[in-house]
Image (spheres, rainbow, N blue to C red):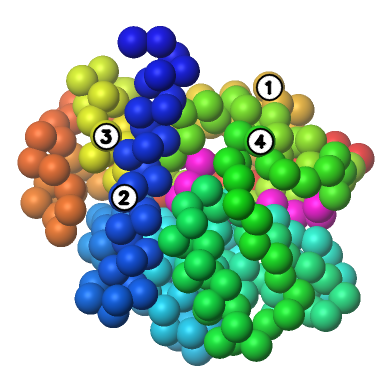
Amino acid sequence: MSDSSESERIERAVTEWYSEAARAVQAQSGCGCGCGSAGCCDSSTALYDPALLAEVPAAAALASMGCGNPLALAELRPGEVVLDLGSGGGIDVLLAARRVGPTGKVYGLDMTDEMLELARSNTARAGVTNVEFLKGKIEAIPLPDASVDVIISNCVINLSPDKDAVFAEAYRVLRPGGRLAVADIVILGPPLPAALRQSLTLWAECVAGALGDEEYRTRLAAAGLADIDLQVLHASSGEELTGGCCTPPELRLHPDTRIASALVKARKPA
């Protein structure tokens, strides 16, 4: 199978998974599982302070399937332009919009029509006006060069089959001195077995596509980003994850391998 056909296979699986998750939220019939699946579906209550959740519609919180709170790293300031890669139901976009204020702007980028519809609905409910949602892929960001001050993302970069393109695009759209602040899944210790990396379910669950922690740093640096810092929040063994609400039973790892949520920040040199 060619690299392009494999990438398309992964992209279709991820799109279908998150489309169904968005439909479940819209129907108020559940939340689906995603990148927050280690904590089961409602990851928002574990990741965000209740005061933050009170700022957004319930559907935005329910659709949150992240693995961390990128706003804890972003240090957003009034007037800044922010881009959220893989904005989902819009929780981080809405929280960021309140922090950059009316003189700032936040873009949410997602490739899933159902998530974009949900995010726009949540934005209308929240009464927030300084946001714009864009349809597109994080490997080809539909914004001009040097147009944003801060890039955030919550457990999405691991879903991309071409992370070098994601990091190159992040570098391109950041202004000199701009910041990257993302939550993501990384692998600690021995890598995942090749067979597990072929599982489309594990791709959608943010496991199969995760980079090793050192490889994550290396690829960010290769894209030109500097001041890279990766902080592990929580690490789980395969045994701890197997049997969760959505995690497939075939997840078998080396005893020393850990699947970790992490906060990652970097900067585009001025």
**Element carrying mark 3:** helix
How many numbered markers are drawn?
Answer: 4
Residue 88 picture location, percent across and down: 49, 60
Q: Disc 3 residue type?
A: Leu
Instruction: Answer yes or no: is residue 154 visible.
Output: no
On-image quarter of the N terminus: top left
* Residue linked to disc 1: 222
Residue 63 picture location, percent across and down: 39, 69
Which residue corresponds to the image point at 83% horizontal and 65% vertical from the top-left? 80
Which residue ends up furthest to the top in the rendered image? 2
- Looking at the image, is mark 2 or mark 1 earlier in the sequence? 2
Q: What range is drawn magenta here?
A: 148-158
Give the number of the mark in front: 1 or 4. Answer: 4
* Residue linked to disc 4: 140
Residue situated in front as seen by the camera: 256 or 7 = 7
- Looking at the image, is mark 1 or mark 4 earlier in the sequence? 4
**Element carrying mark 1:** helix
Which residue corresponds to the image point at 85% horizontal and 40% vertical from the top-left? 145
User: Gap in Å between the C-alphas at discs 1 and 4?
Assistant: 18 Å
Asked if disc 3 and disc 1 are in contact, CB closer than 8 Å, the reply is no
Q: Main secondary structure of the magenta part?
A: strand
Which residue corresponds to the image point at 10% horizontal and 34% vertical from the top-left? 250
Asked if residue 174 is positioned above or below residue 257 in the image, the reply reads: below
* Residue linked to disc 2: 17
Are there few (<14), some (14-19), or many (20+) residues within 10 Å of tag 4? few
* Residue linked to disc 3: 200
